[in-house]
Image (spheres, grey):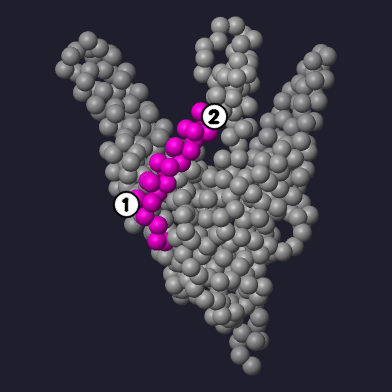
Amino acid sequence: MSDQAANPGLWQPAPSNTIEGHYTGEGGPLFRLAAVTSFLTLITLGIYRFWARTRVRRYIWSSTTAGGDTFQYTGTGLEKLLGFLVAVVILAFALGALQIGLFFLNLSLFSPRSTEEDFAVQIGMAYLSLLLLAPLFFVARYRSLRYKLSRTRWRGVRFGMDNEAWGYALRGVGLTLLTLVTLGLMLPYQTYTLTKYRTDRMWFGNARFALTGRWQSLYPALIHIMIGVGMVIVGIVFIAVAAQGSVAAGIAGGVLAGLGYIWAIIGGLYYRVDSFRRLTAMTVLDGRVSFAARLGTGDILWRLFAGGFIVGGVYSLAIGIVTWLLTSSLDIDVASPELSPAIIAVNVLIILIALLLISALSMVLIVQPIVRLVVDGVTVENADALDRIRQRAEDEQVDADGLADALDFGGAI
């Protein structure tokens, strides 16, 4: 009898029909890439960011392997720039149409207001405009995912996604309102329904993905959000009681509401991680290939807090140096024509360097470690069935997630 058979606790390699994800990216190369592309983005006043994001994605994709095969990203910076320009035109048209509609109602988003009532009306119009434009945010999310899938290959086979963004947008707006009305109780239904809509329209070659299972199975992931919300509600009740003269109730209510808020924030992260695990287990490809994800909330929290602490420290140090230089210049001679431009130039240089470091450090200390945790935790079961999958035709008229860039959703890898 072999050692592994005698002791099943020993590590064993994955079965031949199981594929494990593996991320090979390193901090040094990614830091240099992020720093250089951030610098080029700054000196080109933001124009290079489309090529910068493309280069970073190529590095992330090429560092991701499964079963010995590396992923490939084929998108280009020019595609993203052209998609962004088209999206700007769409947004300008949407905002113009909204303003024309408000004009016929004798309202305006931009006209000056002289009274408090007029100011309140304008604030209300601003919120109304966000509500009317909300579908565009869901369209942007869907099209961004569709573009990235269409430019991703594994084993030489393309991924893809059906062009049904507006159906996703209408569901997204309606389900978001439902979640808000129910104070978050229907969040699992929203998450499952929107994920199923996306998943059921995704392809790998000529094989379609599908999301199985039931939305109610996501409720265990919601537990910590509800605990936090409950603590906040009880805290508010205590504060209301304190208005009747109970100082102790006010203090207890404030502490409880504060702790509940923090608990809900961490609970939101737990929900995202746990629901990801559950939804991954419900996903199948071509009716035969299944998936699993091992991902710990504690690991994600540690990466976020540790990386955020270092990035925040760099930013604070830069602000401290700039403040010290400004204070020193004021103490020496604020009117000196030779000194003031030099101090200003040094301050600007320090801020720019800090921005470069923050961008590069965020990529290395936060984004890449989380990507590594996700990739290394995903396994593909019954992988032998992948050999039956054949190439698919390239998706046409993919807008290169330009709308996501225009709405500032394009920063996600």
Mark sitting on residue 32: 1
The stretch in magenta equals 73-97
Quarter holding residue 182: top right
Say which residue appears at 63% left-offset and 16% top-offset.
Answer: 121
Whether 79 is among the magenta residues is yes
Say which residue appears at 56% left-offset and 71% top-offset.
Answer: 206
Question: Considering only vertical position in the picture, is 48 above or below 1?
Answer: above
Judge the density around disc 2: few (<14), some (14-19), many (≥20) Cα neighbours within 10 Å.
Answer: few
Judge the density around disc 1: few (<14), some (14-19), many (≥20) Cα neighbours within 10 Å.
Answer: few
How many angstroms separate mark 2 from mark 1 (CA)? 44 Å
Disc 2 element: helix
Q: How far from the left and from the top, in percent, is residue 43? A: 27, 38
348 sits left or right of 162 in the view: left
Closest to the camera, between mark 2 and mark 1, is 2
Q: Nearer the viewer, residue 97 or 220?
A: 97
Quarter holding residue 288: bottom right
Q: Nearer the viewer, residue 193 or 65?
A: 193
Question: Considering only vertical position in the picture, is 203 above or below 95?
Answer: below
Pointer 2 residue: 97
Q: How far from the left and from the top, in percent, is residue 265? A: 64, 40
397 sits left or right of 42 in the view: right
Q: How far from the left and from the top, in percent, is residue 323? A: 35, 23
Q: Tell me if residue 129 can be seen.
A: yes
